[in-house]
Image (cartoon, rainbow, N blue to C red):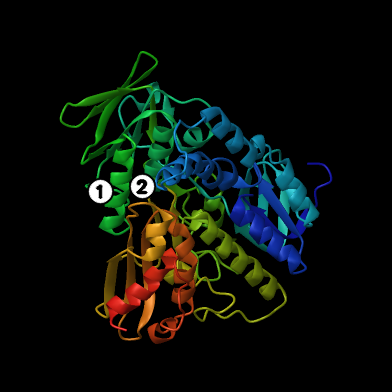
Amino acid sequence: MDGLPETVDVVVIGGGPAGENVAARVVRGGLSAALVEHERLGGECSYWACIPSKALLRPGNALAAARRVPGVASVGRIDEHAVFARRDKFVSEWDDGGQVAWAEGAGVTVVRGRGRLSGEREVTVDGGAVLRANHAVVVCTGSVPVIPNVEGLADVPVWTSRDATSASWVPESLAVVGGGVVGVEMAQAWARLGSRVDLLVRDDRLLTRMPRFAGEAVAEGLRADGVRVRFGVEVRRTSAVDGGARVELDGGEAVTVERLLVATGRRPATSDLGLERVGLTPGRPLEVDDTGLVSGVDGRWLYAAGDVTGRAPVTHQGKYEARVVGDVVVARARGERVSLKPWARYAMTADHHAVTQVVFTDPEVASVGPAEPAEPSHRAVDLPIDVAGASLHAEGYEGRARLVVDTDREVVVGATFVGQDVAELLHAATIAVVGEVPLRRLWHAVPAFPTISEVWLRLLEEYGL
């Protein structure tokens, strides 16, 4: 800790994508920043989530895509050793030296250790160092896995999402508990790498926050890869057996597997932040306004961005929030007025209207905004992705598209696409939602032929244009 400044303009707790963006943004605005991180700079996404999970999924998706194009040689199997080596490269062998060099090169002071609030504008770091902020403290500590209270779970070989994305051997059998994004992505990734996979889902469908047709398509894709998808089941108890785990379900049925992956959601990481020192409750999300200012704390000095707020727990949305927070802190430090007017520079309006997400299974699911009509004026327009571009893209291409339209204003408020490679359709929909582009103007945005984007024309025709 020698050589650390005792006082800086902004202290950021948490060096993941959100924290990095806040720190870089305030330095860009002329303030000094200290970034406190107790693990690896770059956070969950860089080492245990988005990046390694996509690296594990991509080879299987590419092989499946090749098999859908007649004339392309696509026999054989995936080389898991090559997959793991490529994954390890993308996570920099779990070494954050490059991230540290970037931060320091951007003028950010990197502080190693766990930071906790110890007073107004004050953060104490493990080891006793105290950092004081002239203007703001920003909490960007992300989220942690939710581990269910299941009898015997502590006695069996359990994977969390971190284990599932960092393992370098293929278990003969794997049970995945949870039908959300992590559950379905990891079930498919490991099935295609050679595991026998059981997906155990408490609900009656997958991806419950998305349209039913999205979960049904993903379930069909998983079954095609040999995954046994089980709906309406709960894990009652687990026990160790022959180096693996016996998983007992309600009704008395059981499965025995080499590894058990618990993918039952995440919660904001606020339990060990010293929140009680500033009048807040540990373990709860940090409630913020659209500038990122934390509610329930006197004065404009405590901010938060990313998963820790519980608003929109996806990496890219956290980075968006971080950019807003950084700009807000700089503006208020200069004495400027900050407007909360929707879509203003200093307002996180997209959190309410345009949260984007991609599930990188095969088929992919890509969404922005509401998945279902949420107002009396909303109308869902649904179609199969049955266009020339899709037919050329893959033999027997199957996919679906939905627009949610506000019929009073005739603008798109939400969109969902399901199918091979639909992630690349998403940003066009996001621009339409954020820009509130009138449908009659979208009609003049002519999709190139032959592309999958032709589905936009078909959707507008189905709406009645």
Which residue lies most toward the left here? 251
Residue closest to the eye, 200 or 1? 200
Where residue 151 sits in the image (x, y, percent)? 30, 27
Q: Residues within 10 Å of mark 2 (few under 14, many from 20)?
A: some
Residue type (three-letter) at the residue carrying disc 2 = Gly
Q: Earlier in the sequence, mark 1 or mark 2?
A: 2
- Judging by the rendered image, the residue that carries numbered circle 2 is 180
Residue 410's disc is none
Where residue 397 sits in the image (x, y, percent)? 35, 54
Give the tally of numbered discs: 2
Kindly tell me whether residue 94 is visible in this rendering: yes
Which residue lies most toward the front here? 71
Kindly tell me whether residue 109 is visible in this rendering: no
Q: Secondary structure at mark 2?
A: loop
Q: Residue sitting at 62 percent across and 41 percent down?
A: 90
Where residue 292 sits in the image (x, y, percent)? 55, 66
Residue type (three-letter) at the residue carrying disc 1 = Arg
| Residue 114: quarter of image | top right
Cα distance in 3D space between marks 1 and 2: 10 Å
- Judging by the rendered image, the residue that carries numbered circle 1 is 205
Q: Residues within 10 Å of mark 1 (few under 14, many from 20)?
A: many
Task: Please say if the residues under marks 1 and 2 sit with CB atoms less than 8 Å apart.
Answer: no
| Residue 96: quarter of image | top right
Residue closest to the eye, 102 or 108? 102
Q: Residue sitting at 51 percent across and 29 percent down?
A: 80
Q: Residue sitting at 59 percent across and 77 percent down?
A: 345
